[in-house]
Image: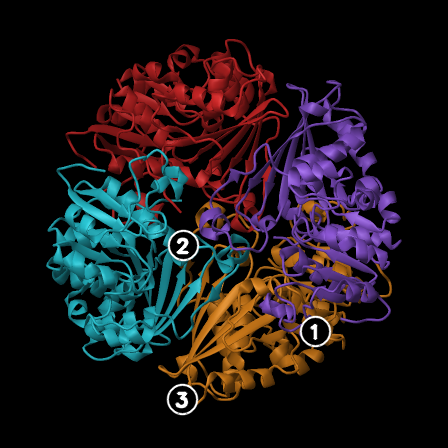
Chain colours: A red, B purple, C orange, D cyan
Amino acid sequence: MGDSDRVPVGIVGASGYGGVQLVRLLQDHPKLDLAYMGGDSSAGKPFSDLYPHLANRTDLMIEAIDLNVIGDRCQAVFLSLPNGLACDMAPSLLEKGCKVLDLSADYRFSNLETYEAWYGKRRTDQAIAETAVYGLPELYRDRIATAQLVGCPGCHCTASLLALSPLLKQGLIIPESAVIDSKTGTSGGGRKAAVNMLLAEADQSVGAYNVARHRHTPEIEQICSDLAGHEVLVQFTPHLIPMVRGILSTVYATLRDPGLVRDDLLTIYQAFYRSSPWVKILPSGIYPQTKWATGTNLCYIGIEVDPRTDRVIVMSAIDNLMKGQASQAIQCLNIMMGWDETLGLPQLGFYP
Amino acid sequence: MGDSDRVPVGIVGASGYGGVQLVRLLQDHPKLDLAYMGGDSSAGKPFSDLYPHLANRTDLMIEAIDLNVIGDRCQAVFLSLPNGLACDMAPSLLEKGCKVLDLSADYRFSNLETYEAWYGKRRTDQAIAETAVYGLPELYRDRIATAQLVGCPGCHCTASLLALSPLLKQGLIIPESAVIDSKTGTSGGGRKAAVNMLLAEADQSVGAYNVARHRHTPEIEQICSDLAGHEVLVQFTPHLIPMVRGILSTVYATLRDPGLVRDDLLTIYQAFYRSSPWVKILPSGIYPQTKWATGTNLCYIGIEVDPRTDRVIVMSAIDNLMKGQASQAIQCLNIMMGWDETLGLPQLGFYP
Amino acid sequence: MGDSDRVPVGIVGASGYGGVQLVRLLQDHPKLDLAYMGGDSSAGKPFSDLYPHLANRTDLMIEAIDLNVIGDRCQAVFLSLPNGLACDMAPSLLEKGCKVLDLSADYRFSNLETYEAWYGKRRTDQAIAETAVYGLPELYRDRIATAQLVGCPGCHCTASLLALSPLLKQGLIIPESAVIDSKTGTSGGGRKAAVNMLLAEADQSVGAYNVARHRHTPEIEQICSDLAGHEVLVQFTPHLIPMVRGILSTVYATLRDPGLVRDDLLTIYQAFYRSSPWVKILPSGIYPQTKWATGTNLCYIGIEVDPRTDRVIVMSAIDNLMKGQASQAIQCLNIMMGWDETLGLPQLGFYP
Amino acid sequence: MGDSDRVPVGIVGASGYGGVQLVRLLQDHPKLDLAYMGGDSSAGKPFSDLYPHLANRTDLMIEAIDLNVIGDRCQAVFLSLPNGLACDMAPSLLEKGCKVLDLSADYRFSNLETYEAWYGKRRTDQAIAETAVYGLPELYRDRIATAQLVGCPGCHCTASLLALSPLLKQGLIIPESAVIDSKTGTSGGGRKAAVNMLLAEADQSVGAYNVARHRHTPEIEQICSDLAGHEVLVQFTPHLIPMVRGILSTVYATLRDPGLVRDDLLTIYQAFYRSSPWVKILPSGIYPQTKWATGTNLCYIGIEVDPRTDRVIVMSAIDNLMKGQASQAIQCLNIMMGWDETLGLPQLGFYP
């Protein structure tokens, strides 16, 4: 660590899959420098105790979490912690002038009542929470540019919202008709021992989880409501798929105007995402594969209209650990720093 | 082959994954005897040329397809061929007194206009097609019992229809609200070389295919319409999942009566499938994993109601090559022969 | 449970993958009846609490482990426990007349000093250990037939020994030249939460483990020494492969007589295993795939000779949970009961 | 394409997995510019016809193969073609002053008799073949630096030779005792439809292929002989593993001096690879996982000594498409251009 021409940044909670992506991405970033890695149980150890393949990077040490040290040393910090911890750290970091990018759910909700209802933790920091910007650049680029505190979106939310936003913003669908069927690889479950995530259990199997009660539901609804201009409820169901990385969200909704055809929608989506270099609208008849996005910050979107049912079907594919987590946070920081939002982020999929 | 106390049956088109399942299942069946295996390109060769792991079964030879021979030797025959071939063979087999179970789409449609529109082949055998019974025993057990000709359901259709039927039959949902998001392993694509089915391509990836135009759509709609008593259109989208076997169909529909709760529906489903030993309704809060059904003729169904949206979400899991294909055909033949429909079929999942 | 014409058997330690295979196999066995399932932490619960897909078998209850109850109720019992526990239970079970099949390492060693050195537990039951027979029927069929206590082989040992035995027994190789490179699916690690066995970690990766110190080494060596008639050391290295089931052992050894060709060895192997229905010697030029053995009690063996190096390469493939564990134990019990050793065991691979 | 400060390079045969890696790597390389992509059947089409996820790179067009055009436009060219084609193209490219990096087997052999014997093609270009340097920089860095023509190593050869070289060079082992058991993901088979590479076939299975006759054998032996100073034969056996990327080679050999311990060998390996930034010797007791190398040009090496058998076991892990193919070719070109050999190549594994 330590290149004095670059902006020093820190990671708190580097031991998880999000953390290890951030480390890899920061190494290749031309203007950011990893100046601090903090952890709790692994404080004082080299990062390679957790990830032996990084044994050649002996400079990567995990330090104890000391907010003063972080504030002194870093201009920006990524908080990659379990839900409910970031909201105890962010205030002092902000006070010290640090930009904060929180990868947990703590700063995704403008209304903390929703957070409390779905996450079960009391919060008294409504004032700070209201200063947080939802870190989906394709929707909130301008607000992110001037933010000090960014609440980075959930992985399913990123894929779902990029698929739904043009439809809601333009009023093209009946909002309450929206059904989101989302499929994720198992890395979304994090790096913790759990029987149902064993290869012997999760391989060769598919199933839904947290049906009708997954916490990404209110998060998607909050942004959909913002786009639609009125309260929107959606049906969101996540599924676990036997692969490591990737999310495919298949979104179904009824068109208000049954006369719309696929090519109309392709045009609308292309216009909506014209200034968004990380969203790729696929040509007519091509549907996204999650593998295409693997290792990149890209979101691939395919669109189909069923004239028999007057429904639009939108499919969006991302890498859950990249656009769904780590690289999107760096995309936000690029914007906060006034840089090109593509700076230092991989653009060509890791294929096959 | 050859146990004279048993009923002799044949397989035409034994080289595919459906065929090799039938061979395995017939070996363990107490009352059926595999008396004939027919193929085209592989006629005259031992079956183990195609499947070396069957080299110890030197009696399994693939013969040329000769309808007279089949009719003389077999009381029943499974046709496991590409679409459009069975309808040229079934008539003479039926004439010779053979029971015919067709695993292709040729005899799934009572109205051949629908078949012609979706499968692109002219048909002139409407009279025979009308004698065919749709081979989903949980819905058409009585008609199968007296049928000579059974059109076995498509794999996605089996999973989708077992999930939807109680809702439609009881008029509990708004039929046109039904969205079916189905996920299948790659064995559904059969045993033919194709770049997109290579492990290097299909592993670590998920995508939809044939969106808004998959041929299982009209098949599902035909049965749904029969159950509802009026024409029903559904939204059906299949997805390819990186695993070998299994289908999970997630079905979304809006309840007519928003007062219904999950336990009501569990009761309704249990009643609907009371006489169906192969359908298992899971307890409250348990959702099916395809792995649970692997290797069996079972269909596991989980049910959830979302009181926020008044939707029911039904998930059904099957083994696509078993209940979705080979073992369901044997279940049908058990019924046609007047036997217990569980005879000779595996009941405990091949786990893990 | 409970068919009075059958021989009642019990399982102690039914919660693991070995246990759930035994349950499935016993259900289909024509002469055995599962009369008891015992567990520690899960005593008093239905088996379906551990395996929800067995919820339809409400009769499968896990009872507390009471050796008197087991002895009264069962004629034979499978002990499927962590190493070091069976040797505390077997004596009283044997005393009550129970046949005991131990799936752990406790009764695999005739010389307990070796056990103590590699397993780190003091043992004082050398007398009983000496009555135990090593449960590899292809080598010790006659002794198993009259045994009361069988120590079932380790999974890697089964594959390795079936590959090596004809060579050693006939003195065809230089014993100390033997190198065994073994590859196993992750189910061999059992059903316990462990980070390195997560799908996200173990998928898309291969690595060796316990190199030069795996406990299956002395077990293989003990049997090799018995066959060779003098002490033999082998090089054994296990590898973890990203799949659920299966073991492939690739065995390399230098031929004493460089004039031997592949066909000579095929003949020798066929003769050696002539009375062993579960070992299949593949034709010239065909090498075994683990998938061919999946779900069966079979071991497939392929043989190659490299005339350039005077080495023989033998490859053996088994299902680690079947021939490597559960079904082999039942094969042993079949022999102990005087039945055909193929009774009730699956013979056709679960393919694809 | 087209940055005039950079060195223009071309790819002939860009449609395969090697080609698509080169495209991705060249995009991120600070001093190379992809100025030409040539193909046969796909000439005139955009690259995204083959790889839809590259649809956003509309500048990537596949051109007809015209050696004059390539020679005029490129300073260096990567030939990524089936065996036997490069030797017809390289001469004219070299004549036009192009540096040539051949990824096929055509220029790996200094003695064309060996090539002819194993690859079955007559060759008359012994003179040119003798000017080719074997593109394994860790062994032939100096010769590569001045080469015009480089024959890039086979994937298994790279992993095997990096594991074996220090032992042979220092005379630490009995060369003829070397056994190489290599495991590869299926991407090594390339992007062509083949039944045995289907996910439904290759997933959940492991098997050896081309036992005692794989073409990488003479290639490994040629380099081993060069290192040892006399002719060396090795036992090499490749296995197909159910994963996309990665090779693990497990190498067994008998030590000449039984007194050597693991730490001695670690020291020897560290010294041998001191100037090789892409080879990482793992600490005592740590064995490489192929996942650690995924996406990088790294080779991880773990070493164990078995004092019971006097054997050394060396395990090496690479990404077969990177260090085993595309990124190693760029490493060679970096050296040929006089640049740092790490230039533009990924160093942190794509984990998980």
Judging from the image, what secondary structure is the residue with disc 2 in? helix
Q: Which residue is mark 3?
A: C258
Camera-nearest residue between C295 and C124: C295
Q: Nearer the viewer, residue C110 or C186?
A: C186
Label 1 near label 2: C-beta < 8 Å? no
Mark 3 vs mark 2: tell me if same chain.
no
Estimate the x, y position of residue B172 in percent, counting from the top left: 77, 24
Q: Are marks 1 and 3 on the same chain?
A: no
Percent x, y of residue C195: 46, 47
Residue C72 is tagged as: none
Residue type beneath disc 3: Pro
Q: Position of residue D23 (x, y in %)?
A: 29, 44
Whether residue A211 is situated above or below residue C237 in the rendered picture: above
Q: On the picture, is D33 further left or further right than C325?
A: left
Q: Is residue D94 above or below residue D346?
A: below
Left or right: C7, with C237 as reference point? right
Chain letter for mark 2, please.
D
**Which residue position is annotated with label 2?**
D187
Amino acid tagged 2: Ser
Q: Quadrant of residue D323?
A: bottom left
